[in-house]
Amino acid sequence: MDFKSSDTITGPRTEDHLPHTAQAAAKIVIVGGFGVGKTTMVGSVSEIRPLTTEETMTQAGIGVDDNFGSKSKTATTVAMDFGRISITDELVLYLFGTPGQERFWFLWNGLFEGALGAVVLVDTRRLEVSFDVMGRLEERGVPFVVAVNDFPDAPRYAIDELRQALDLAAEIPIVRCDARRRASSRDVLMTLMTFLHSLAMSGAAASGAAASGAATA
């Protein structure tokens, strides 16, 4: 395509520029089954215009994609969603939302690469789809928190009941959220960062104790 001298090439918006105070960045993945709200969460919390790869759902997906509880859903992510949020003046999180349908799960390996942690979004109407998601994270050693997206017509369970149903270790945080609300989604990310910090401190303490023991042996 030939451009004329009068053509205007639009670059990033001013508000999309990386803050000049940013000194560190971390990659976070938002994962979960089909229709649990991953695209919604990335879009609600991102401080930049989010990148989405949604395509219109067609008749070809009937019998292939399980859209239980999402009958009104007309589009689906086929590659990834991307957003960014500044947690502090110095720390920026890059958010990558994964596709939910199993036929696109082969893309997850690339999205998990280099991820500091993950948010597993859960729909209480379809808890069973979360097991494969969490299993993949555990296989790759990616720490995660679980966020229960409170859909209006979804049943509500106590946190202890959810922990038991999902077979989660006691130390893995479970929080409720409304993925449509920026503040709620940001709270989920803050929970993840606090959890990652506690893991790092525990690891440092264990390493220090091991080093001390070796020195006195």
Image (spheres, rainbow, N blue to C red):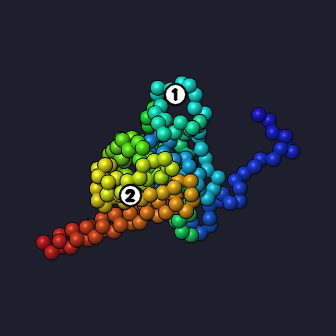
Q: Position of residue 105 (x, y in %)?
A: 44, 37
| Residue 4 seen anywhere in this rendered image of the structure | yes
Indicate left or right for 3 with 102 as reference.
right
Indicate left or right for 13 with 169 as reference.
right
The amino acid type, in three-letter code, at marker 2 is Ile
Establish if 114 lies above or below 106: below
Residue under the point 12% across and 72% down:
217
Mark closer to the chain start, 1 or 2: 1
Q: Are dots 1 and 2 in contact, CB under 8 Å?
A: no
* Depth order, front residue of 76/211: 76
Q: Position of residue 51 (x, y in %)?
A: 61, 47
* Snapshot quadrant of residue 160: bottom left
Residue under the point 30% across and 65% down:
203
Label 2: few (<14), some (14–19) or many (≥20) C-alpha neighbours in 10 Å: many
Q: Name the residue under label 1.
A: 61
* Depth order, front residue of 68/136: 68
Q: Is mark 1 on a helix, strand or loop?
A: helix
| Residue 118 seen anywhere in this rendered image of the structure | no
Label 1: few (<14), some (14–19) or many (≥20) C-alpha neighbours in 10 Å: few
The amino acid type, in three-letter code, at marker 1 is Gly
Q: Is mark 2 on a helix, strand or loop?
A: strand
CA separation, marks 1 and 2? 32 Å
Q: Where is residue 196 in the image (x, y as percent from the top left)?
A: 39, 62
Q: Mark 2 points at which residue?
A: 174
Residue under the point 61% across and 59% down:
47
Establish if 50 lies above or below 79: below
Indicate left or right for 158 with 48 as reference.
left
